C-alpha cells in the first residue's frame, strides 16, 4: 500500500478514535437521564418504534436496560481506544458503526446533528476499507474509503454555504448576531461589534464564500491543507462560541481524506 494512502487512512482512524472517545465520555456522563429513572427512559420513547417489528422492539428494550447500556458504552470506549492506538479491523469497525446507529436511534435519529452525520460518514468509510481488506484488496478499499469520506465532507461545507447564500437573513448579516446572541457567551452586549451591520455582513459573507468554495480544495494538496486548516480554526471557534465540541474532531477526522484526494487528483 502506498505510503500516502497508509498515512491518510491511519490519520482518519486516529482522529476518529479521538472523536468517538469524546462522544462516549459524554454519553457516560448522561447515564442518569438515560436510565430507567431518567427523563429519557425507554418507556417514554419506545412508542417511536411502534412501526417496527416485534423483534426490533424487543431488541431495543433489551439494549436499553441500564446495565447493558453501560456495558455498551464501556465497550465502545475501549474499541475507540483500540482504533486510536492500533487501527481498525472488520469486527471492531462494524461494532463501532452498528453501536453508533443504535445510539442515534436511541436519540430519535440524532444527538448532536451534523457531528452525528459526519461520524457515521467516517465510520462508513472505515467499514468500506475493512470490507475490501477482508476480501483481499486492502489498497482499493482504502482508496474507496478516503474518496467516500472526502466527498461527503466537502459537500457538507458546500451545501451549508449554499443554504446560507439562499437565505436573505444570512446575506444581509441579520442571522449571525442572532446565532451569537444565543451562544455560550450570549446574550451579546448591546455594544457588541456583531450588532453592527457592516461587521455582521463581512463575517457572514466570509462564512458563505469559504463554505461555497469547498470544492476548490481538490485543485491541489496545498490548497486542501490550507482549506482544512482554516476549517479547523472555524470549528474551534464554533466550539468556543456555541459549545459544539463534537464538531471539532467529527470534521477534523475527515481532513486527511480531503488532502489525500486532492493530491491524487493532481
Image (spheres, grey):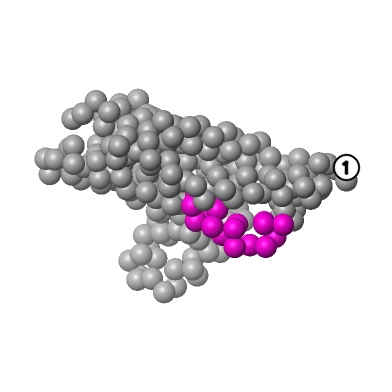
Query: Dominant secondary structure of the magenta stretch?
Result: helix
Q: Nearer the viewer, residue 178 or 170?
A: 170
Please state, as top left, top right, bottom left or bottom right, where the N terminus lies in the image.
top left
> Is residue 186 or residue 31 the one in the foreground?
186
Residue 78 visible in the snapshot: no
If the image is split into quadrants, where does the C terminus sit?
top left
Q: Is residue 5 left or right of residue 15?
A: left
**Residue 84 rendering spot, x and y as whole percentages:** 37, 29
Q: Residue at x 21, y 29 (%)?
A: 2
Is residue 241 in sight in this rendering? yes
Callout 1: helix, strand or loop? loop
Q: Which residue is mark 1?
A: 191
> What percent of the width, then of the height, locates residue 217?
43, 41
Question: What residue is drawn where x is 31% and y is 45%?
Answer: 147
Along the line of sight, which residue is nearer the eye, 234 or 90? 234
Q: Residue furthest right?
A: 190
Tally of numbered discs: 1
Q: Is residue 214 above or below residue 62?
A: above
Q: Is residue 167 magenta?
A: yes
In this rendering, would 106 be left or right of 5? right
Q: Where is residue 96 shown, x and y percent of the image?
A: 35, 43
The magenta span reads 157-172
Amino acid at each position: 500500500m502506498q505510503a500516502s494512502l497508509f498515512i491518510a487512512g491511519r490519520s482518519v482512524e486516529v482522529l476518529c478514535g479521538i472523536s468517538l472517545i469524546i462522544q462516549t465520555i459524554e454519553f457516560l456522563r448522561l447515564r442518569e437521564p438515560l436510565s430507567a429513572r431518567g427523563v429519557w427512559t425507554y418507556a417514554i420513547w419506545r412508542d417511536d418504534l411502534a412501526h417496527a417489528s416485534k423483534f426490533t422492539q424487543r431488541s431495543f428494550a433489551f439494549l436499553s436496560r441500564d446495565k447493558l447500556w453501560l456495558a455498551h458504552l464501556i465497550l465502545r470506549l475501549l474499541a475507540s481506544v483500540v482504533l486510536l492506538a492500533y487501527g481498525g479491523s472488520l469486527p471492531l469497525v462494524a461494532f463501532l458503526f452498528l453501536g453508533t446507529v443504535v445510539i442515534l436511534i436511541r436519540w430519535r435519529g440524532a444527538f448532536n446533528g451534523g457531528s452525528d452525520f459526519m461520524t457515521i460518514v467516517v465510520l462508513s468509510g472505515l467499514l468500506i476499507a475493512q470490507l475490501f481488506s477482508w476480501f483481499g484488496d486492502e489498497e482499493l478499499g482504502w482508496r474507496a474509503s478516503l474518496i467516500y469520506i472526502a466527498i461527503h465532507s466537502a459537500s457538507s461545507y458546500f451545501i451549508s454555504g449554499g443554504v446560507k447564500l439562499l437565505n436573505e437573513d444570512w446575506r444581509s448579516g441579520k442571522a449571525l448576531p442572532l446565532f451569537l446572541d444565543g451562544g455560550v457567551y450570549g446574550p451579546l452586549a448591546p455594544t457588541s461589534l456583531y450588532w453592527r451591520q457592516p461587521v455582521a455582513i463581512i463575517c457572514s459573507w466570509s462564512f458563505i464564500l469559504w463554505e461555497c468554495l469547498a470544492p476548490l480544495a481538490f485543485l491541489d494538496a496545498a490548497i486542501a491543507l490550507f482549506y482544512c486548516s482554516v476549517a479547523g480554526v472555524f470549528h474551534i471557534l464554533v466550539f468556543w462560541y456555541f459549545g459544539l465540541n463534537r464538531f471539532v474532531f467529527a470534521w477534523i477526522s475527515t481532513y486527511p481524506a480531503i488532502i489525500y484526494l486532492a493530491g491524487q487528483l493532481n
